Structures are given as C-alpha cells and as structure tokens.
Amino acid sequence: MERYTERVDSRLKELDAVSTGVCPGCDTCREDHGEFVVEEDDEREPGQNAWYVVTPYPGGTRKATEADYYRTEAEAEGAARKTFADAWSNCEVETEASFRRGGCGICNSPLGGNFEVWHWLDADGAIQHEYDACIDCVHYLANGTLPEGEE
Ligand SMILES: [Zn+2]
Ligand SMILES: [Zn+2]
C-alpha cells in the first residue's frame, strides 16, 4: 500500500482550495448545520413579521423574540447568513463528525468511522462539498499531523 501522504497528495493535487470543516458564509454549510436557518412562524398574526432565524444558544435553541422576526424571507436570510459568519468567527459553530460505513474520500482509507465535511473550489469557483473526510485527514489538512504509524 502507498504511504498515507502519497495517497492524499494524489487525490488532492487536482483540487483547488481544499479545506475541512464548516465554511463561513456558506449557505450549504449553514443548512447542513441545521441552525442559523430561516423559518416561518405560522402562528403569527397577519401583518406581523413572520420570518425568524433559528439561533442556537448554550444548551439548545431559544425561541425567537420579537427582535428576531423579519418581514420577508430574504431579509431573514441575510440576517441568518451574517449571524452564522459571526458565530463562526467567534468559534461558536459546533461541528459534529458523523458516522459512516464507507471509506475516506481523501486518503482512500476503506475504514468506516467518523467523517467530516470538506470542500474544494471547482473551475467556476463554486464550492463543492464532500462529506467523507476521515479524522486523520482532518488533522493532516489542518496542521500537517500524520496518522499514527506514518512518517
Ligand atoms: Zn460550505
Ligand atoms: Zn482520510
């Protein structure tokens, strides 16, 4: 079997701007994350602002207050995008690795385990999301740490 770094490099050499984890300001990551998304409150009276941003706080998701409501979905989306980016820069966006049976899309390891989102830029500059970065690859891409047994 090829060494870990050779496997990773051969996968990544054709891809631009690879990174792991949530990307700030990215609608796909925000929706996958499930918080900082926009919902319509159908119990609001006609004429009241009905769109709000689902905002997490330590211990859960709080109910929207009057100040969280927006008149249109587009306004709420703008606010949600900003809230998500702010939370990300304050390290308040918690990400959870999810368990999968398949192998890693970066180093090609066939083992199941916990995987994280990763992404790269295609030729048009659009962010492509993949959901199969193993924890070894997350560490390697973040700070160059090699998995145990590799050098
Ligand atoms: Zn993203
Ligand atoms: Zn991997």
Image: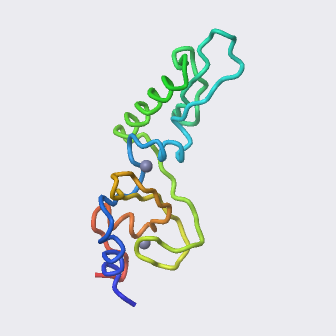
Which residue is drawn at the image coordinates 52% and 33% (left, top)?
57
Colouring scheme, one of rainbow, by chain, secondary structure, one colour: rainbow
Q: Residue 132, percent across and down?
A: 49, 65
Which residue is drawn at the image coordinates 58% and 64% (left, top)?
99
Task: Tell whether 99 sits left or right of 27.
Answer: right
Task: Tell whether 134 sits left or right of 51.
Answer: left
Which residue is drawn at the image coordinates 48% and 50% (left, top)?
95
Q: Quadrant of residue 14 in the image?
A: bottom left
User: Where does the C terminus fall, quadrant-wise?
Assistant: bottom left
Identify the residue at the far front of this view: 124
Identify the residue at the far top of this view: 47
Relative to 58, say whether 41 is above or below: above
**Nearer to me, 136 or 27:** 27
Q: Residue 40, percent across and down?
A: 63, 26
Relative to 30, say whether 116 is above or below: below
Which residue is drawn at the image coordinates 31% and 81% (left, top)?
6
Q: Quadrant of residue 12 in the image?
A: bottom left
User: Where does the N terminus fall, quadrant-wise?
Assistant: bottom left
Q: Residue 76, percent across and down?
A: 51, 25
Task: Tell whether 10 sits left or right of 81.
Answer: left
Relative to 126, say whether 44 is above or below: above
**Nearer to me, 11 or 146:** 11
